[in-house]
Amino acid sequence: MARLIRLDRTGHTTLAEWTEGDLVSRESAVKAFRRELDQGMLASVPRADGSAEVVRELPLDADLVVLRRPIAGG
Amino acid sequence: MEAAGRPSLAEAAALWWREETSERTLRRDGRRWTAWTMWIVVAFTAPGVVLLLLSPLTLPVALGCFAHAWFVPRLQARRGARSVVPLGDKRAVRRQGAGDPGADGVALGLLGDLVGQGGRELLTRSGLALERGELGTWLVGERGALMVRPGGRRVDCWCVGVADQDGLPSGDRVAHLLLALREDERGFAKVANLGFSGAAWRVRRGLPERSCAALDAARGVARGRTGAGDCKRAG
Protein backbone atom coordinates (compact mmCIF):
# COMPACT_ATOMS: atom_id res chain seq x y z
CA MET A 1 0.00 0.00 0.00
CA ALA A 2 1.37 3.41 -1.03
CA ARG A 3 1.45 6.26 1.49
CA LEU A 4 1.37 10.05 1.40
CA ILE A 5 2.96 11.47 4.55
CA ARG A 6 3.60 14.99 5.82
CA LEU A 7 6.60 15.81 8.01
CA ASP A 8 5.18 17.81 10.89
CA ARG A 9 5.32 18.32 14.65
CA THR A 10 4.10 14.77 15.32
CA GLY A 11 7.06 13.30 13.43
CA HIS A 12 4.93 12.58 10.42
CA THR A 13 1.26 12.23 9.66
CA THR A 14 -0.13 9.79 7.12
CA LEU A 15 -2.54 11.81 4.98
CA ALA A 16 -3.57 9.11 2.54
CA GLU A 17 -2.99 5.51 1.63
CA TRP A 18 -3.92 3.96 -1.68
CA THR A 19 -3.65 0.85 -3.75
CA GLU A 20 -3.56 0.55 -7.49
CA GLY A 21 -7.01 -0.95 -7.84
CA ASP A 22 -8.83 1.29 -5.36
CA LEU A 23 -10.04 4.35 -7.29
CA VAL A 24 -11.66 5.99 -4.27
CA SER A 25 -8.49 5.90 -2.20
CA ARG A 26 -6.45 7.15 -5.16
CA GLU A 27 -8.78 10.08 -5.70
CA SER A 28 -8.71 10.94 -2.03
CA ALA A 29 -4.89 10.81 -2.06
CA VAL A 30 -4.70 13.15 -5.06
CA LYS A 31 -7.01 15.63 -3.31
CA ALA A 32 -4.97 15.52 -0.11
CA PHE A 33 -1.77 15.98 -2.13
CA ARG A 34 -3.08 19.05 -3.98
CA ARG A 35 -4.39 20.58 -0.75
CA GLU A 36 -0.98 20.32 0.89
CA LEU A 37 0.82 21.77 -2.14
CA ASP A 38 -1.61 24.68 -2.15
CA GLN A 39 -0.62 25.32 1.45
CA GLY A 40 3.04 25.65 0.48
CA MET A 41 4.32 22.14 1.14
CA LEU A 42 6.77 20.53 -1.28
CA ALA A 43 6.58 16.92 -2.36
CA SER A 44 9.40 14.48 -2.67
CA VAL A 45 9.62 10.82 -3.63
CA PRO A 46 12.55 9.01 -1.98
CA ARG A 47 14.03 6.37 -4.27
CA ALA A 48 15.67 3.11 -3.30
CA ASP A 49 19.01 4.25 -4.82
CA GLY A 50 19.26 7.08 -2.26
CA SER A 51 18.07 9.84 -4.56
CA ALA A 52 14.81 11.78 -4.28
CA GLU A 53 12.60 13.32 -6.90
CA VAL A 54 10.62 16.55 -6.72
CA VAL A 55 7.03 15.98 -7.82
CA ARG A 56 4.17 18.37 -8.57
CA GLU A 57 1.60 15.65 -9.29
CA LEU A 58 1.01 12.67 -7.06
CA PRO A 59 2.89 9.72 -8.57
CA LEU A 60 0.43 6.92 -7.99
CA ASP A 61 3.04 4.27 -8.68
CA ALA A 62 5.32 5.48 -5.85
CA ASP A 63 5.44 3.59 -2.55
CA LEU A 64 6.03 6.68 -0.46
CA VAL A 65 5.50 10.39 -1.10
CA VAL A 66 6.83 12.81 1.51
CA LEU A 67 5.56 16.34 1.97
CA ARG A 68 8.06 18.73 3.49
CA ARG A 69 8.35 22.41 4.30
CA PRO A 70 10.61 24.69 2.23
CA ILE A 71 14.23 25.17 3.26
CA ALA A 72 16.12 28.48 3.35
CA GLY A 73 19.64 29.78 3.77
CA GLY A 74 20.48 30.71 7.34
CA MET B 1 10.44 21.46 -12.61
CA GLU B 2 13.64 21.32 -14.60
CA ALA B 3 16.46 23.83 -14.93
CA ALA B 4 19.09 23.28 -17.59
CA GLY B 5 18.07 19.63 -17.90
CA ARG B 6 18.32 18.81 -14.21
CA PRO B 7 15.66 18.58 -11.48
CA SER B 8 15.24 21.90 -9.77
CA LEU B 9 14.57 22.57 -6.13
CA ALA B 10 11.55 24.86 -5.82
CA GLU B 11 13.38 27.01 -3.27
CA ALA B 12 16.33 27.45 -5.64
CA ALA B 13 14.10 28.34 -8.57
CA ALA B 14 12.74 31.25 -6.52
CA LEU B 15 16.26 32.67 -6.07
CA TRP B 16 16.62 33.70 -9.73
CA TRP B 17 19.18 36.39 -8.94
CA ARG B 18 21.63 33.96 -7.38
CA GLU B 19 24.38 32.30 -9.37
CA GLU B 20 24.06 28.56 -10.01
CA THR B 21 26.47 26.59 -7.86
CA SER B 22 28.98 24.51 -9.78
CA GLU B 23 32.47 23.06 -9.35
CA ARG B 24 33.80 26.28 -10.85
CA THR B 25 31.99 28.60 -8.42
CA LEU B 26 33.00 26.40 -5.49
CA ARG B 27 36.67 26.48 -6.54
CA ARG B 28 36.48 30.24 -6.95
CA ASP B 29 34.83 30.74 -3.55
CA GLY B 30 37.40 28.43 -1.97
CA ARG B 31 40.25 30.51 -3.43
CA ARG B 32 38.58 33.68 -2.16
CA TRP B 33 38.40 32.26 1.34
CA THR B 34 42.06 31.21 1.20
CA ALA B 35 43.09 34.66 -0.07
CA TRP B 36 41.02 36.34 2.65
CA THR B 37 42.61 34.20 5.36
CA MET B 38 46.10 34.95 4.04
CA TRP B 39 45.26 38.65 3.94
CA ILE B 40 44.14 38.56 7.59
CA VAL B 41 47.38 36.81 8.60
CA VAL B 42 49.56 39.27 6.65
CA ALA B 43 47.58 42.33 7.73
CA PHE B 44 48.13 41.54 11.41
CA THR B 45 51.57 39.92 11.25
CA ALA B 46 53.31 42.61 9.17
CA PRO B 47 52.66 45.50 11.60
CA GLY B 48 53.88 43.30 14.45
CA VAL B 49 57.13 42.56 12.62
CA VAL B 50 57.62 46.25 11.73
CA LEU B 51 57.03 47.28 15.33
CA LEU B 52 59.64 44.79 16.56
CA LEU B 53 62.14 46.05 13.99
CA LEU B 54 61.52 49.63 15.12
CA SER B 55 61.95 48.87 18.78
CA PRO B 56 61.99 45.72 20.91
CA LEU B 57 60.04 47.74 23.50
CA THR B 58 56.95 47.41 21.30
CA LEU B 59 56.90 43.65 21.96
CA PRO B 60 53.58 43.69 23.87
CA VAL B 61 51.82 45.49 21.01
CA ALA B 62 53.49 43.21 18.44
CA LEU B 63 52.32 40.17 20.39
CA GLY B 64 48.80 41.59 20.24
CA CYS B 65 49.10 41.78 16.44
CA PHE B 66 50.34 38.19 16.21
CA ALA B 67 47.51 37.03 18.46
CA HIS B 68 44.99 38.65 16.11
CA ALA B 69 46.66 36.97 13.11
CA TRP B 70 46.15 33.61 14.85
CA PHE B 71 42.79 34.27 16.46
CA VAL B 72 40.72 35.79 13.62
CA PRO B 73 41.17 32.88 11.12
CA ARG B 74 40.57 30.42 13.93
CA LEU B 75 37.36 32.23 14.87
CA GLN B 76 36.15 32.17 11.25
CA ALA B 77 36.75 28.43 10.97
CA ARG B 78 35.02 27.79 14.29
CA ARG B 79 32.04 29.84 13.19
CA GLY B 80 31.84 27.79 9.99
CA ALA B 81 32.02 24.50 11.88
CA ARG B 82 29.37 25.61 14.32
CA SER B 83 26.95 26.52 11.54
CA VAL B 84 26.20 22.80 11.54
CA VAL B 85 24.05 21.64 14.43
CA PRO B 86 24.22 17.85 14.93
CA LEU B 87 21.11 15.87 15.78
CA GLY B 88 20.23 16.29 19.45
CA ASP B 89 22.85 19.00 20.03
CA LYS B 90 22.25 21.06 23.16
CA ARG B 91 22.22 24.27 21.06
CA ALA B 92 19.15 22.99 19.20
CA VAL B 93 17.50 21.81 22.40
CA ARG B 94 18.01 25.25 23.94
CA ARG B 95 16.51 26.91 20.90
CA GLN B 96 13.62 24.55 20.16
CA GLY B 97 12.86 23.09 23.59
CA ALA B 98 13.08 19.44 24.59
CA GLY B 99 10.30 18.37 22.21
CA ASP B 100 7.85 15.50 22.37
CA PRO B 101 9.67 12.15 22.83
CA GLY B 102 6.96 10.34 20.86
CA ALA B 103 7.26 12.68 17.88
CA ASP B 104 11.06 12.51 18.09
CA GLY B 105 10.90 8.72 17.92
CA VAL B 106 8.62 8.76 14.86
CA ALA B 107 10.85 11.32 13.12
CA LEU B 108 14.00 9.36 13.90
CA GLY B 109 12.39 6.20 12.52
CA LEU B 110 11.73 7.87 9.18
CA LEU B 111 15.19 9.45 9.13
CA GLY B 112 16.71 6.04 9.83
CA ASP B 113 14.85 4.64 6.83
CA LEU B 114 16.11 7.50 4.65
CA VAL B 115 19.79 7.11 5.59
CA GLY B 116 19.69 3.29 5.53
CA GLN B 117 21.52 0.76 7.62
CA GLY B 118 25.01 2.08 6.91
CA GLY B 119 24.22 5.73 7.60
CA ARG B 120 22.15 5.04 10.71
CA GLU B 121 25.11 4.01 12.84
CA LEU B 122 27.11 7.11 11.90
CA LEU B 123 24.06 9.32 12.44
CA THR B 124 23.51 7.91 15.93
CA ARG B 125 27.18 8.29 16.82
CA SER B 126 27.88 11.70 15.31
CA GLY B 127 24.50 13.41 14.89
CA LEU B 128 25.22 14.02 11.20
CA ALA B 129 23.87 12.28 8.11
CA LEU B 130 26.42 11.49 5.41
CA GLU B 131 25.33 11.93 1.81
CA ARG B 132 27.46 11.38 -1.29
CA GLY B 133 27.00 14.05 -3.93
CA GLU B 134 28.54 15.14 -7.20
CA LEU B 135 30.00 18.34 -5.79
CA GLY B 136 31.35 16.65 -2.68
CA THR B 137 30.47 14.52 0.32
CA TRP B 138 27.88 16.16 2.53
CA LEU B 139 27.25 16.01 6.26
CA VAL B 140 23.80 17.23 7.17
CA GLY B 141 22.65 18.26 10.63
CA GLU B 142 19.46 19.68 12.11
CA ARG B 143 20.65 23.00 10.77
CA GLY B 144 23.53 23.58 8.39
CA ALA B 145 25.65 21.25 6.33
CA LEU B 146 29.30 20.56 5.68
CA MET B 147 30.58 19.57 2.29
CA VAL B 148 33.94 17.82 1.98
CA ARG B 149 35.29 18.58 -1.47
CA PRO B 150 36.69 15.75 -3.62
CA GLY B 151 40.13 14.85 -2.29
CA GLY B 152 39.06 15.45 1.30
CA ARG B 153 41.28 18.45 2.02
CA ARG B 154 38.80 21.33 1.84
CA VAL B 155 35.50 21.63 3.68
CA ASP B 156 32.75 24.11 2.85
CA CYS B 157 30.37 25.10 5.65
CA TRP B 158 26.82 25.96 4.64
CA CYS B 159 24.15 27.77 6.64
CA VAL B 160 20.77 26.27 5.78
CA GLY B 161 17.69 25.06 7.61
CA VAL B 162 13.95 24.50 7.43
CA ALA B 163 12.39 27.92 6.83
CA ASP B 164 9.65 27.33 9.40
CA GLN B 165 11.05 25.01 12.06
CA ASP B 166 8.15 25.59 14.41
CA GLY B 167 7.49 22.41 16.36
CA LEU B 168 9.39 20.08 14.03
CA PRO B 169 11.15 17.22 15.81
CA SER B 170 14.92 17.16 15.41
CA GLY B 171 14.91 14.10 13.15
CA ASP B 172 12.46 15.79 10.79
CA ARG B 173 14.69 18.84 10.52
CA VAL B 174 17.52 16.60 9.28
CA ALA B 175 15.10 14.72 6.99
CA HIS B 176 13.96 17.99 5.39
CA LEU B 177 17.52 18.97 4.51
CA LEU B 178 18.44 15.48 3.38
CA LEU B 179 15.45 15.22 1.05
CA ALA B 180 16.13 18.67 -0.43
CA LEU B 181 19.79 17.73 -0.97
CA ARG B 182 18.83 14.48 -2.67
CA GLU B 183 16.30 16.24 -4.87
CA ASP B 184 18.79 18.74 -6.26
CA GLU B 185 22.32 19.08 -4.89
CA ARG B 186 23.24 22.21 -6.84
CA GLY B 187 19.92 23.80 -5.97
CA PHE B 188 20.54 22.97 -2.31
CA ALA B 189 23.93 24.70 -2.48
CA LYS B 190 22.31 27.67 -4.21
CA VAL B 191 19.75 28.09 -1.44
CA ALA B 192 22.28 27.62 1.36
CA ASN B 193 24.71 30.37 2.32
CA LEU B 194 28.41 29.54 2.25
CA GLY B 195 29.68 30.54 5.68
CA PHE B 196 33.25 29.31 5.45
CA SER B 197 35.56 27.35 3.20
CA GLY B 198 38.93 26.08 4.34
CA ALA B 199 41.15 23.21 5.32
CA ALA B 200 39.41 20.21 6.88
CA TRP B 201 41.64 20.31 9.98
CA ARG B 202 40.54 23.88 10.69
CA VAL B 203 36.86 22.95 10.55
CA ARG B 204 37.47 19.79 12.58
CA ARG B 205 38.84 21.82 15.47
CA GLY B 206 35.51 23.64 15.78
CA LEU B 207 33.27 20.57 15.61
CA PRO B 208 31.76 18.89 18.65
CA GLU B 209 33.86 15.85 19.62
CA ARG B 210 31.22 13.32 18.56
CA SER B 211 30.88 14.82 15.07
CA CYS B 212 34.57 14.34 14.23
CA ALA B 213 33.86 10.72 13.25
CA ALA B 214 31.41 11.94 10.61
CA LEU B 215 33.95 14.36 9.18
CA ASP B 216 36.58 11.60 9.09
CA ALA B 217 34.12 9.30 7.33
CA ALA B 218 33.19 12.01 4.81
CA ARG B 219 36.87 12.73 4.14
CA GLY B 220 37.41 9.01 3.59
CA VAL B 221 34.58 8.95 1.05
CA ALA B 222 35.87 12.12 -0.63
CA ARG B 223 39.32 10.52 -0.96
CA GLY B 224 37.73 7.43 -2.44
CA ARG B 225 38.05 5.43 0.76
CA THR B 226 35.29 4.51 3.18
CA GLY B 227 35.43 4.14 6.96
CA ALA B 228 35.00 6.44 9.90
CA GLY B 229 38.51 6.44 11.34
CA ASP B 230 39.17 7.60 14.85
CA CYS B 231 38.21 10.90 16.32
CA LYS B 232 41.48 12.25 17.64
CA ARG B 233 41.74 15.98 17.50
CA ALA B 234 43.93 17.30 14.76
CA GLY B 235 45.87 20.55 14.96
Image (tube, rainbow, N blue to C red):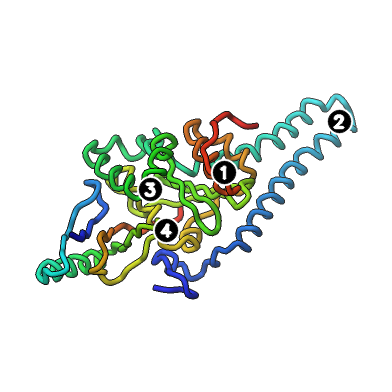
| Among the two numbered marks 2 and 4 on one chain, the one whose residue lies closer to the N terminus | 2
- Residue type for callout 2: Leu
- Disc 1 packing (10 Å; few <14; some 14–19; many ≥20): many
Chain of the residue under label 2:
B
The answer to whether dots 4 and 1 both sit on one chain is yes
In space, the residues marked 3 and 2 are separated at their CA atoms by: 56 Å
Closer to viewer: mark 2 or mark 4: 4
Height in image: A38 above or below A5?
below
Question: Are discs 4 and 1 less than 8 Å apart at CB?
Answer: no
> Mark 3: which secondary structure?
helix
| Among the two numbered marks 1 and 2 on one chain, the one whose residue lies closer to the N terminus | 2
Residue marked by disc 2: B52
Chain of the residue under label 3:
B
> Mark 4: which secondary structure?
helix
| Among the two numbered marks 1 and 3 on one chain, the one whose residue lies closer to the N terminus | 3
- Residue type for callout 1: Gly
- Residue type for callout 4: Arg
Which residue is more in the foreground, B92 or A64? A64
Residue marked by disc 4: B182
Estimate the x, y position of residue B7 in percent, counting from the top left: 43, 69
Horizontal side of A38 relative to B3 (left or right) equals left
Q: Which residue is at 46% across, 71% downward?
A: B6
| Among the two numbered marks 3 and 2 on one chain, the one whose residue lies closer to the N terminus | 2
Horizontal side of B119 relative to A8 (left or right) equals right
